[in-house]
Amino acid sequence: MTTRPHPRSALLLLFAALIVVVSACSSDTVDEPSDLELAPDFAVPTAAGGTFSIDKHIADDGRPIFLNLWASWCFPCREEMPAIDEASKINSDIAFVGISVQDTTSDAQAFLDEVQVSYTIGFDEEGTVDDEYRPLGLPASYIISSDGVILERIFGKVTVEGLAEKFKTHFG
């Protein structure tokens, strides 16, 4: 004899899952690595027609990186992109890179046509960035040193002021 869960139990479970998803997608939590952790390398096509790679950037450019993972369907991602664009213009000594994950390139490009950001945008068409970085939710951002070490993980929406504080902490 099989038993079915009580409808109220199923509803409570669904509600709990919804709370976890919403909080992961909208909270500003920080996870600092306990050991030196190198940022996983990846190569993705960019909106400008080239390719972005962490390792190639470090070898050729050498600036620290602010890496932002986003999706066109993520409302906090949509809300933070103008702030990230403004921060990228203020902090030219840091490379700003946004990677569309968990999204189609066409949906991501349609959103980019609306928002018009000036920093590098890439498309995780194969899912490798999402697999390597394993964000707890979106948006997810990573501050990466000029030698490729993840200095800080930020889960949730960022602001210009918040980024200024974080950059001051990490880069002086």
Image: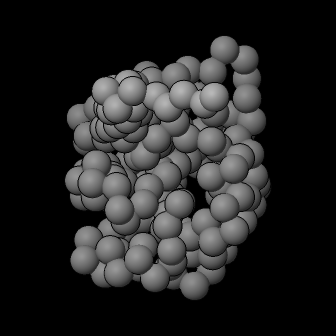
What colouring method underlies this structural image? Answer: one colour
Q: Residue at x 39, y 31 (%)?
A: 10
Point out the image quarter for the N terminus.
Answer: top right
The percent position of residue 172, horizontal first and vertical second, equals 45, 25
Kindly indicate the quadrant of the structure image that contains residue 42: bottom right
Residue furthest to the front in view is 1
Number of numbered labels in the structure image:
0
Residue 81: x and y, percent? 30, 57
Nearer to me, 41 or 74: 74
The image quarter in which residue 133 lies: top right
Closer-to-camera residue (58/7): 7
Is there any visible trace of residue 20 in the rendered image? no
On the image, the x and y values in percent for residue 136 come to 52, 36
Image spot of residue 64 (x, y percent)? 57, 44
* Closer-to-camera residue (32/90): 32
**Rendered view: 9 above or below 21:** above
For the point 42% across and 60% down, the residue is: 71
What residue do we see at 53% from left, 60% from top? 102
Q: Is residue 88 left or right of residue 130?
A: left
Q: Is residue 105 visible?
A: yes
Residue 36 higher or lower than 144, as above or below? above
Left or right placement of residue 17 versus residue 11 in this view? right
Residue, x 44% and y 56% (percent of image)? 70
